[in-house]
Image (tube, coloured by chain):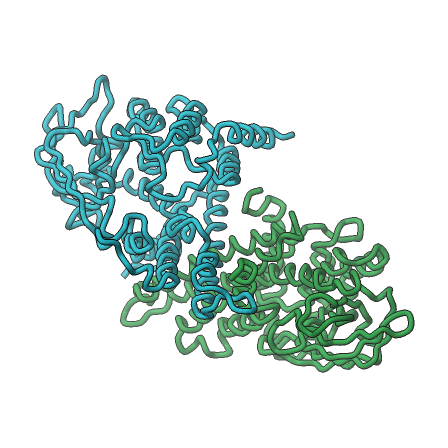
């Protein structure tokens, strides 16, 4: 038996023993996943047991080095772990922006002290991070951001406003892009900074969306002091001052990578497969075909696209592991995933007819089809709009000329 | 298993790319077309391909093949799709070889695989009986006669049927026209007196034949696989064909797109490169994304044929559907983005457009496979 086969056998046995039955329903919604953080309360005993078992093994962040709370798995081993987890439909024991976005950026750009301070806390689910990128005047043109950050000797002084900060109201820290040089060209005066959300001067206001609910907030910074060092030498700035755009770009690739791995039709629109759902709602004719030929064709098309998409995530990951970096191709995944996600929930609404468009006495029910459908409109906007992704593919992948 | 090519497969890809761009570029295809070569391909080129081991690409080494599996066949087909290489590769080395190697008796393998590998015997698969792919609809009759059967009926669009030495014919031994059971495959000599072949040149300048058979007597030795259970074998052969056609269309999509992006970078209008226009950039970026999706779908279907042949059918359908849609989009956009010259015979993009249309129709277009997958999923 090869080392990898051995690892697979061990992993399978470990999962069988440690992953509770209740946690084998797929990691499918923002509501049932384990987010962690200071305000976190486990939703069930099973969720807690699963998290603790994974933590003990370093499997909340399997590929991170052991000294930072991970299991130090190789790419091949990590793939096996994912495959084995998917095989029993196990949820991820912990998932949040610290794991998917900040962590990889810190691993690439952080100092040893920064890694020690933050990565372990992320791995242990102690700190929940949110992302302070967009501003009211800086959406697709992110680099035009204006939140001001002044050097005050032993600390930074921050004034400004961020928008679309997901879960800012229940997060502990924020990784933020701020303007440290107003005179430099726009990409050259931005700094990537880490801020404790408990700092004085930070206030948060949730935003109500067309879906009736949302994780999004506005976050205001009013004379917020950020100490340059925490304890010994743990700097609050990641990478160099005024070079935060490099970090931001790296992180956006991870964000797109994450947004691009959502298994669009299943993940974002409900556990049941689309065709099965349609057959249940609409019924089939004497030949076993859905009793709505036009919808049937659209559903089948979407399922083919979804299948090819999921295989592409697998292939591009395998290529990245073999040393051919994913790079700007992550924009293709983000683009395809968000469009497919929207298509999937649109189809579910079409299948559901007026039933799906009916709301409760208190408005749009959280987790309802309509709620998901409306919320999903944002997928092709957040994390870089579809149009921005297409621009990136044109320029970076196809190298088409600029205007 | 990783969803990428192994080192060996990459070497095959490089070799194929080198050989075909050198010896069988689109210009060579034009030559065959313009000379009205009745074969529709160049026999010398086919011999060279066979000498390199391509004709026996999926055949096991013990029978003289190079045992590269379906991923190997797909790697070659993709490069052929890029260069619009016309050859008996698909009919003989994919369909014929799959039929004999997977469903043939020891004797049939002994008899035919060697001559597939050395390129000396050409095969063709006769399935459809109308203009649209419908493999269950078999009326072509095999009626018991003496110790064997008598074959009578008609087949349409038998690719390479006009040059084939051997025909694999799906015939009905029992049941009704649309019944998957009751179908039997026969492997017969194509030049038998009772077989009438009408050459049907196609829009893509490849060749096919309509075939009429009138009372051809066959014996049990001519049966490929099991009596009445030929549909399962047919399914397997078609699955392999669909995946490899998918690879070919993926190659055509990539090349038509590459020609187009080159053009976008060089053509100027309104004082600037047309590739700087966002209206074109976004369409190109969308197409680039679809091409990536297609590559993954195709490679997975080929890998599955190698790993677990019996379970590959649905994945092959998905790959055929996805690659067909992408190829159609890629070649349509290639013409449109080239403007007026895109519809001239002089420019290659139109040749790709025509080829992928026929490849789409062959063994089921995207709609056919969407229907098939939907039924399989219970809706």
Q: Is residue A300 left or right of residue B169?
A: left
Q: Residue at x 35, y 64 (%)?
A: A353
Q: Residue at x 47, y 64 (%)?
A: A283
Residue reaching furthest top?
A232
Q: Where does the image place residue B242, in percent across and percent down from the top left?
A: 61, 62
For the question of whether residue A51 can be seen, the reply is yes
What chain is colored green? B
Splitting the image into 4 quarters, where does residue B51 fall? Answer: bottom right
What chain is colored cyan? A
Quadrant of the snapshot with the N terminus of chain B: top right
Residue reaching furthest left?
A223
Residue reaching furthest front?
A361
Residue B303's place in the image compared with A45, above or below, is: below
Callout count: 0
Q: Where does the image place residue A10, in percent across and percent down from the top left?
A: 56, 28
Q: Where does the image place residue A337, in percent across and percent down from the top left?
A: 39, 52
Splitting the image into 4 quarters, where does residue B355 fall? Answer: bottom right
Q: Nearer the viewer, residue B217 or B113?
A: B217
Q: Is residue A16 left or right of residue A169?
A: right
Splitting the image into 4 quarters, where does residue B136 fall? Answer: bottom right
For the question of whether residue A322 can be seen, the reply is no
Residue A31's place in the image compared with A357, above or below, is: above
Q: Nearer the viewer, residue A19 or B200?
A: A19
Q: Where does the image place residue B323, in percent across and percent down from the top left?
A: 52, 62
Q: Nearer the viewer, residue B138 or A20?
A: A20
Q: Is residue A204 left or right of residue A337?
A: left
């Amino acid at each position: 038996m090869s080392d990898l086969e051995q690892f697979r056998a061990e992993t399978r046995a470990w999962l069988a023993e440690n992953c509770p039955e209740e946690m084998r329903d797929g990691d499918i919604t923002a509501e049932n996943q384990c987010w962690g953080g200071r305000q976190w309360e486990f939703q069930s005993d099973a969720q807690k047991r699963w998290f603790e078992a994974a933590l003990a093994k370093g499997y909340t962040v399997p590929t991170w080095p052991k000294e930072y709370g991970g299991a130090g798995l190789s790419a091949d081993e990590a793939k096996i772990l994912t495959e084995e987890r998917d095989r029993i439909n196990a949820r991820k024991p912990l998932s949040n922006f610290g794991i998917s976005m900040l962590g990889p950026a810190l691993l690439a750009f952080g100092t040893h002290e920064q890694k020690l301070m933050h990565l372990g806390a992320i791995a242990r689910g102690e700190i929940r991070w949110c992302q302070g990128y967009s501003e009211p005047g800086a959406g697709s043109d992110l680099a035009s951001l204006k939140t001001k950050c002044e050097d005050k000797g032993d600390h930074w002084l921050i004034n400004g406003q961020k928008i679309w900060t997901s879960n800012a109201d229940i997060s502990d820290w924020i990784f933020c892009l701020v303007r440290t040089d107003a005179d430099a060209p726009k990409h050259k005066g931005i700094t990537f900074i880490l801020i404790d959300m408990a700092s004085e001067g930070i206030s948060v206001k949730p935003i109500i969306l067309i879906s009736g609910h949302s994780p999004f907030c506005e976050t205001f910074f009013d004379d917020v002091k950020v100490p340059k060092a925490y304890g010994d030498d743990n700097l609050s700035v990641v990478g160099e001052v005024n070079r935060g755009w490099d970090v931001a770009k790296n992180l956006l690739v991870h964000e797109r990578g994450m947004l691009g791995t959502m298994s669009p039709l299943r993940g974002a629109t409900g556990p049941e497969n689309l065709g099965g759902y349609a057959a249940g709602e609409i019924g089939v004719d004497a030949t076993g075909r859905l009793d709505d030929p036009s919808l049937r064709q659209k559903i089948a098309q979407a399922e083919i696209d979804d299948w090819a998409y999921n295989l592409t995530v697998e292939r591009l990951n395998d290529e990245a592991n073999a040393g051919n970096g994913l790079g700007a191709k992550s924009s293709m995944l983000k683009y395809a995933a968000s469009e497919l996600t929207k298509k999937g929930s649109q189809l579910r609404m079409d299948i559901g007819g007026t039933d799906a468009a009916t709301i409760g006495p208190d408005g749009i029910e959280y987790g309802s089809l309509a709620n998901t459908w409306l919320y999903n409109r944002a997928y092709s906007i957040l994390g870089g709009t579809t149009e921005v992704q297409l621009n990136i593919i044109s320029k970076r992948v196809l190298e088409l000329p600029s205007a | 298993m990783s969803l990428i090519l192994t080192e060996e497969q990459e070497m095959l890809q490089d070799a194929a790319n080198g050989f075909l761009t050198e010896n069988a570029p689109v210009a060579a295809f034009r030559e065959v077309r313009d000379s009205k070569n009745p074969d529709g391909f160049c026999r010398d080129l086919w011999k060279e391909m066979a000498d390199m081991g391509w004709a026996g690409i999926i055949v096991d080494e013990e029978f003289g093949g190079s045992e590269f599996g379906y991923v190997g066949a797909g790697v070659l087909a993709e490069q052929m799709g890029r260069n619009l290489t016309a050859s008996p590769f698909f009919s003989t080395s994919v369909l014929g070889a799959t039929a004999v190697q997977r469903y043939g008796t020891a004797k049939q393998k002994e008899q035919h695989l060697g001559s597939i590998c050395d390129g000396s015997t050409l095969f063709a698969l006769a399935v459809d009986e109308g203009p649209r792919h419908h493999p269950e609809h078999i009326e072509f009759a095999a009626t018991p006669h003496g110790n064997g059967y008598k074959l009578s009926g008609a087949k349409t669009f038998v690719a390479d049927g006009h040059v084939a030495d051997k025909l694999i014919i799906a015939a009905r031994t029992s049941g009704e026209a649309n019944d998957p059971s009751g179908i039997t495959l026969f492997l017969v000599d194509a030049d038998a007196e009772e077989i009438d072949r009408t050459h049907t040149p196609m829009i893509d300048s490849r060749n096919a034949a309509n075939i009429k058979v009138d009372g051809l007597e066959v014996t049990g030795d001519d049966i490929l696989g099991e009596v009445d259970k030929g549909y399962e074998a047919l399914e397997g052969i078609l699955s392999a064909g669909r995946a490899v056609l998918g690879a070919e269309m993926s190659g055509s999509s990539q090349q038509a797109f590459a020609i187009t992006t080159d053009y976008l970078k060089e053509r100027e209008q309104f004082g600037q490169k047309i590739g700087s226009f966002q209206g074109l950039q976004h369409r190109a970026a969308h197409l680039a994304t679809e091409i990536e999706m297609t590559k993954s779908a195709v490679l997975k279907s080929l890998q599955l044929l190698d790993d677990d042949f019996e379970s590959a059918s649905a994945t092959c359908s998905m790959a055929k559907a996805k690659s067909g849609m992408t190829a159609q989009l890629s070649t349509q956009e290639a013409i449109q983005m080239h403007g007026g010259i895109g519809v001239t015979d002089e420019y290659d993009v139109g040749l790709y457009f025509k080829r992928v249309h026929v490849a789409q129709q062959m063994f089921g277009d995207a709609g056919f496979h969407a229907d098939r997958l939907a039924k399989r999923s219970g809706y």
